[in-house]
Amino acid sequence: MTAVQPKPTAHSVGETFDSLSPATDEVVGTYPVHTREDVRATVARARDAAGWWSGLGFDGRAERLRRWKGVITRRLPQLCQVVRDETGKPLADAQLESVLAIEHIAWAGKNARKVLGKQRRATGLMMSNQVATVEYQPLGVVGVIGPWNYPVFTPLGSIAYALAAGNTVVFKPSEYTPGVGKWLVDAFNEVVPEWPVLQLITGFGETGASLVGAGVDKIAFTGSTGTGKKIMAAAAETLTPVIIEAGGKDAVLVDADADLEAAADATVWGAFSNSGQTCIGVERVYVHERVHDEFVAKVVEKSKDVRAGSDEAAQYGPVTMPSQLAVIKRHIADAIERGGKALVGGVDAVGDRYVQPTVLVDVPEDSSAVKEETFGPTVTIAKVRDMDEAVEKANDTKYGLGSTVFSKSRGPELAARLRTGMTAINAPLSFAGIASLPFGGVGDSGFGRIHGPEGLREFARPKAVARQRFTAPIVMTSFSRKEKTDALVAKLITVLHGKR
């Protein structure tokens, strides 16, 4: 096959690389490979701008974020075309992720003051002469390392919240989607021309590593678990805190009373949309034995209408990262060799750019297709005797990002038992579109949260302040206190907390 890997090239002002269309190999842009020195200089400029941006206050920043989302919204077709050029995904899918990102920008700007502003805290009887407050202050400079699969929605889930919290941001997009990153940063700089509040750096892994070690106050990373571990190790050298949003092996549970039509539709869309290149996409399904055969038949029928391609009628595009094709093929082949059956697709579904839908059944639970993240348009479906077995198998993974439950009567109960950061009930991946909900995982899916109040607080440090209103009648924090004071304190604490 023809490699669709961005390639470094010589350039008169330094090394550059080409961004290529995964559908055609056409060069769609050329970008600099920023060096360690370039990155440090960029972070230094961000540091200089941090005081000004923080000084705008919540209202001032919200106004700039409002104007930024306005620019993105008015030029949405242009942004979607850039996304399609670099990822190959249909324009409608590019629009969907961009619309959700716009919603997140709006929510972060609108809610930052309420979440991060000064709040009173109770002092307790022993410290009743004090006034206690907590507020959240900006960290300073945040480094964001974004992925290529959702190059608008995913990084803006960190960037928008970091900006709303008062930080400046240095953004390193994937080497597969630098043009999308540049477009977003250019749009922001139109409405914030005074200082370099949001800056772009481009390049490969070394550029990202340089950002981790450049003195930023926090790193927000989205990508593979392996790369996330390397970033954590590098960040530990400078005690730089990190948010890691890594991979997933997300499961769908289908109970005996589920709406099978809705569950099948959600499974097909969750497994195959964006060519399966979705960290919260559907990779495993566990179905109650009473409805298993009917459910499988519906999934097979719906899958037959889904096709990968670059034409307008195709439902999804090419695999963006060429090396992933071998992983997808290996998982399908292993599943079939170990007794699984491909009811749709199979090994031959993997082409040199596109992978057609594959539905696998009777796949052993210890196979790579079940245990490892495939990140392609495949799905395994397994029959279970009841939902207890479904929960047990769904949780038997090193990952823990998202999950989905289809059940008319037991949805919340089953959702609570799943070891994942998010669960959708009776709808596919709905938690990602709700800006007030935190997004993140457990285990090898990472830690920390973006989106919602938790996402805003990830990009701020809590500042606690205790202010004395008047001198307490009992002064405990002085060497001049008397024995009778200690006795009185002991008596008081016994009255307050000594009851059986």
Image (tube, rainbow, N blue to C red):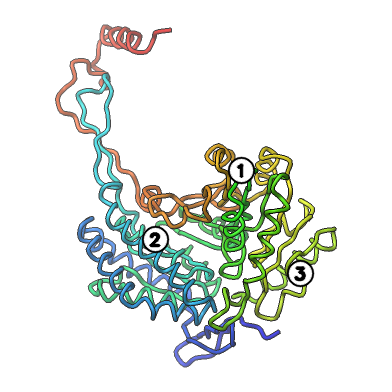
Can residue 242 be seen by looking at this rendering?
no
**Is residue 119 left or right of 181 when viewed as pictured?**
left
* Element class at badge 1: loop
Q: Are marks 1 and 3 in contact (CB under 8 Å)?
A: no
- Identify the mark at residue 62; answer none if there is no mark: none
Which one is earlier in the sequence, the residue at label 1 or at label 2?
2
Q: CA distance from mark 1 to mark 3?
A: 30 Å
Please tell me in which quadrant of the rendered image residue 320 appears: bottom right
Identify residue for label 3. Answer: 346
Q: CA distance from mark 2 to mark 3?
A: 43 Å
Q: Position of residue 4 (x, y in %)?
A: 62, 82
* Residue 82 appearing in the image: yes
Residue with the mark numbered 1: 257
**What amino acid type should be assigned to the residue bearing mark 1?**
Asp
Crowding around mark 2 (Cα neighbors within 10 Å: few <14, some 14 to 19, many 20+) is many
Residue 134 percent across, percent down from the top left: 28, 40
